[in-house]
Image: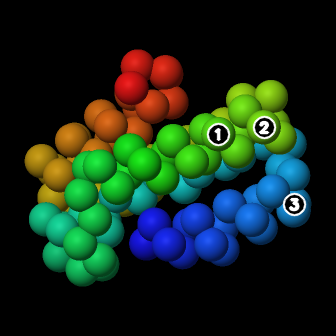
Amino acid sequence: MRAAVTDLWLPALDTFRPELIVISAGFDAHRDDDLASLGWVEADYRWVTQQLVAVADKHSRGRIVSTLEGGYSLGALARSVGEHVKVLIGAD
C-alpha cells in the first residue's frame, strides 16, 4: 500500500496540484474488518493521512475535507479514525 501511495498517488497529486483534498475516509481495509481484507492497521491510516496533509499543505493551502464512509469493526474504526483525526488537527 505504501509503495502504491509513494510511487503512484503522490506523483499524480503533484502533477494535478489540487486546490482542495477531499478524503472519502473508509476504514474497512483494517485487518480487523472483514470487508476488504487488505490488512491495514492504525499506523497505515496515520501514514496515508500524513501524506495527504503534506499534499494539501503544498498545493491546497492546507484545505482538506474528510468524510467518514466505512469501517465495520467498531474497535478498529475508533482507533483508525482517532489516528486520522490526530493527524488532521496536527496532534500527531
Between 74 and 83, the one lying in front of the other is 83
Tell me whether the residue at label 1 lies in contact with that at label 3, contact meaning CB atoms closer than 8 angstroms. Answer: no
Mark 1 lies on a secondary structure that is helix
From the viewer's perspective, tell me whether residue 64 is left or right of residue 60: left
From the viewer's perspective, tell me whether residue 30 is left or right of residue 19: left
- CA separation in Å, label 1 and label 3: 14 Å
Mark 1 or 3: in front is: 1
Find residue 78 and report its horizontal and vertical position in percent: 22, 41
Q: Residue 35 lies in what quarter of the image? A: bottom left
Find residue 42 and report its horizontal and vertical position in percent: 26, 49
At x 41%, y 19%, the residue is 91
Q: Mark 3 points at which residue?
A: 16
Between 9 and 79, the one lying in front of the other is 9
Between 11 and 78, the one lying in front of the other is 11
Tell me whether the residue at label 2 lies in contact with that at label 1, contact meaning CB atoms closer than 8 angstroms. Answer: yes
Query: In the displayed structure, would residue 10 be above or below residue 36?
Result: above
Q: Mark 1 points at which residue?
A: 54
Query: In the displayed structure, would residue 10 be above or below residue 46?
Result: below
- CA separation in Å, label 2 and label 1: 6 Å
At x 30%, y 34%, the residue is 82
